[in-house]
Amino acid sequence: MKKEEAIIRIVGKIDLEYDGIVDQQKVRSIIEEVLYDYELVSTSRELVIVNDMHDKIMLYLATRKIDGLAKRTLEAYSRHLNRFAHYMRKNIEDINAMDIRMYLASYSKTGVKNTTLATEINYLRGFFKWLKSEEYIDKNPMDKIKTIKVEKRLRDALTIEELEKIRDACETYRQRALVEFFYSTGCRLEEVEKLNKEDIDWQNLKLKVIGKGNKQRVVYLSPKAKVYIQKYLMSRLDTCEALFVTERNPISRLGRRSIQREFNKLANLAALSRRVYPHLMRHTTATNLLNGGADLVTVQQVLGHQDPSTTLVYAKISDKNVEHEYRKNMIQ
């Protein structure tokens, strides 16, 4: 067993034991420091390891967690890869491209859409790429698996009228503060959940958030968002550090499901015929920024996207705005 593999196993085991409350990077640094002058020798005497797939999946997930992957994303990885392992029942080094094609064909027969199948391929591609880089396999069977082309659809967004109806439907300071914060910043749900009151720079109307892959970025508050968030904070009598908190005792940080429930409630109060959820506010932020004249790079940075094409999927530019930009910039 390689030292790196042993360290990943140890860190992963500690994290599972203490339910994610430990600082993985710090624990890993301590273990690496202690073992620096040591060589590890496996005491295993087994000649054959039957189906080592689950073991490798655990190592892979531990590695990705150390890399900063979000808990929800890790759960999706685990779900997809363990389904593959349950079907395959073979050792990692024995799996070939035909095995994977047979699995994908079987999965396809369950009636899943091409988008779901494409996602499955992406999970497997990442897993086998890691196996190859860690020298668990000599050849990557996914190199022979073609990517399924899926048409990227423009994401929907709230209309201005729908947004105003949601604002008017707010019954509490917290509801209005949530609406304005999500719309102003374009933040993801998991980013908002972790925020504290002290994170906001009120003078400059901005704050730093930790996004996917533990990457930090700056997001901005509108003057309207400032007004309603401050009204909400002034109405609170608690000392909890969280930006958004529960309304019942004991007061604690407002969780994702509670935030989602607030948006569901607002959709009903506003008598909208569609679902309203935090990520829809993010779509709306992106769409309205682009329609308002913001360039793609700016919107990409606000949303925290690494790939500009992702921003285009989130944001739909109106035909009217396209025509305006064309006539303004076209050289005669």
Image: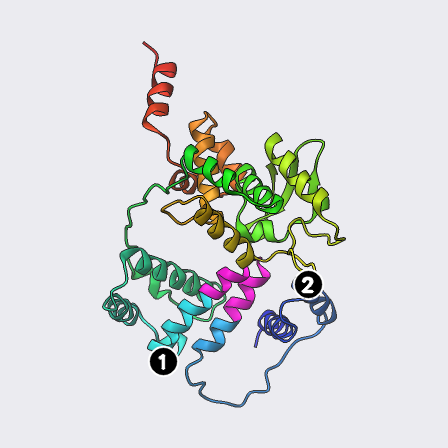
Indicate the position of residue 239 as horizontal and vertical percent values: 76, 53
Q: Is residue 24 magenta?
A: no
> In terms of depth relative to the viewer, which is nearer, 171 or 275?
171
Is residue 222 in view? no
Say which quadrant the N terminus sits in: bottom right
Disc marking residue 89 = 1
> Could you say which quadrant of the image residue 10 lies in?
bottom right
Q: Is residue 67 magenta?
A: yes
Indicate the position of residue 23 as horizontal and vertical percent values: 68, 63
Left-right relation of 102 to 271? left
Comparing marks 2 and 1, which lies closer to the viewer?
2
Q: Residue at x 31, y 60 (%)?
A: 117
Identity of the amino acid at label 2?
Asp
Q: How is the image coloured?
A: rainbow
Identity of the amino acid at label 1?
Arg
Q: Residues within 10 Å of mark 2 (few under 14, many from 20)?
A: few
Type of secondary structure dominating the magenta stretch = helix
Query: Earlier along the polypeptide chain: callout 2 or callout 1?
Result: 2
Q: Which residues are magenta?
A: 59-76
User: Dot 2: what SS?
Assistant: loop
Residue 115 vs 294, above or below: the answer is below
Residue pushed farthest right? 239
Indicate the position of residue 195 as horizontal and vertical percent values: 65, 49
Disc marking residue 188 = none
> In terms of depth relative to the viewer, which is nearer, 45 or 228?
228
Left-right relation of 15 to 47? right
Left-right relation of 200 to 306? right
Q: Residues within 10 Å of mark 1 (few under 14, many from 20)?
A: some
> In terms of depth relative to the viewer, which is nearer, 50 or 293?
293
Disc marking residue 23 = 2
Label 2, label 1: how far apart the Cα atoms are: 34 Å
